[in-house]
Amino acid sequence: MPSFPSTRLRRTRSTSWSRNLVRETRLSPHDLIWPLFITSGNGVEEPVASLPGVSRWSVDNIVDRAREAVTLGIPCVALFPNTPPDKRSDDGAEALNPDNLMCTAIRAVKDALGDEIGVLTDVALDPYTSHGQDGLIDEKGYVLNDATSEVLTAQALNQTEAGADIIAPSDMMDGRIGRIRNALEGGGHHNTQIMAYSAKYASAFYGPFRDAVGSGGLLKGDKKSYQMDPANADEAMREIAMDIAEGADSVMVKPGLPYLDIVRSAADGFNIPLFAYQVSGEYAMIEAAAAAGAGDRDALILETLMAFKRAGCSGVLTYHAAYAARLLND
């Protein structure tokens, strides 16, 4: 006699409508944040060689990309500047210029689209320093935590006053979330969100990003003294707990796929919006695999994004955001 319960799962998988009906995890364009790189000039598109399909855009084109995001149903763009070499310095002072590339792009997007789209901005000094580190350094090249946090707070206020909706400190200095939250509240910016890069690992997957923002060739040493050791998991939970206690509205794990165990632990341990950054190296590997015929590009993109949602993410920062949104909208 057949064992009917033993075939129950197979029956629910037998048709597409049934699979849709019982699907546990759902992915939509509303789950995506689109990182965009800003460059100088007007009408400029500069392809990033190590990120096939990704370009740096002048501010006017950034506005067009943000408008495209609205059309696709993507709720937020993340902005990263490629600061010209002549505006980089040891102290990263250009980060505090109210007319720098970042602030100019923020104002342009918000002037054009207002609250139709959110603007998330990176807070760190590596796009502005001549040495490529995320903060201020001493004579030995060691990144100074408290001095850097003071500058990052001023940088966050500069971006907020330009119109940023979400401040995203990516530097991993201790205590900077509390400093920034206090400064935002003190400046009357009560609705400005902070998305903390809480578990940012000293990863080998960031290379193409550093090319895109122009810091890769400048970096002296590494970032292991302030970004997390890839061997550590419990430490990530402590970092997340500290950032939440200091006033973060959401937290991030970076990179993404190699750290899905961290995402799952964070989702289980904290009741707060949780994001993952599918970083440049992850993007480049998918593109390389597809170009080599090692996998179907569309399927690879959607499967990896679904994995983030299944692991517990509220959303994902991904360079595939616009392409994935088109797939999901079809």
Image (cartoon, helix red, strand yellow):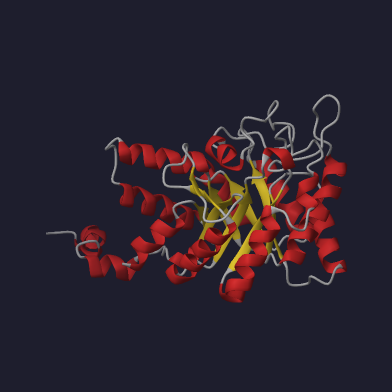
Relative image position of residue 327 (x, y in whole percent):
34, 61
Image quadrant where residue 222 sits: top right
Who is closer to the viewer here, 235 or 161?
Answer: 161
Residue 10 is left or right of residue 84, and the answer is: left
Image quadrant where residue 28 sits: bottom left
Relative image position of residue 71 (x, y in whole percent):
44, 71
The quarter of the rendered structure image containing the N terminus is: bottom left
The quarter of the rendered structure image containing the C terminus is: bottom left
The vertical placement of 215 against 123, above or below, is above
Relative image position of residue 76 (x, y in whole percent):
56, 64
Who is closer to the viewer here, 119 or 249?
Answer: 119
Relative image position of residue 176 (x, y in whole percent):
80, 51
Residue 85 is left or right of residue 314, and the answer is: right
Residue found at x 66% / y 57%:
121
Residue 193 is left or right of residue 255, and the answer is: right
The vertical placement of 6 against 282, above or below, is below
Who is closer to the viewer here, 277 or 7?
Answer: 277
Q: Is residue 313 visible?
A: no
Residue found at x 41% / y 49%:
304
Q: Is residue 129 visible?
A: yes
In the image, farthest residue toward the bottom: 115
The vertical placement of 22 against 198, above or below, is below
Question: How many callouts does the rendering have?
Answer: 0
Image quadrant where residue 154 sits: bottom right
In the image, farthest residue toward the front: 42
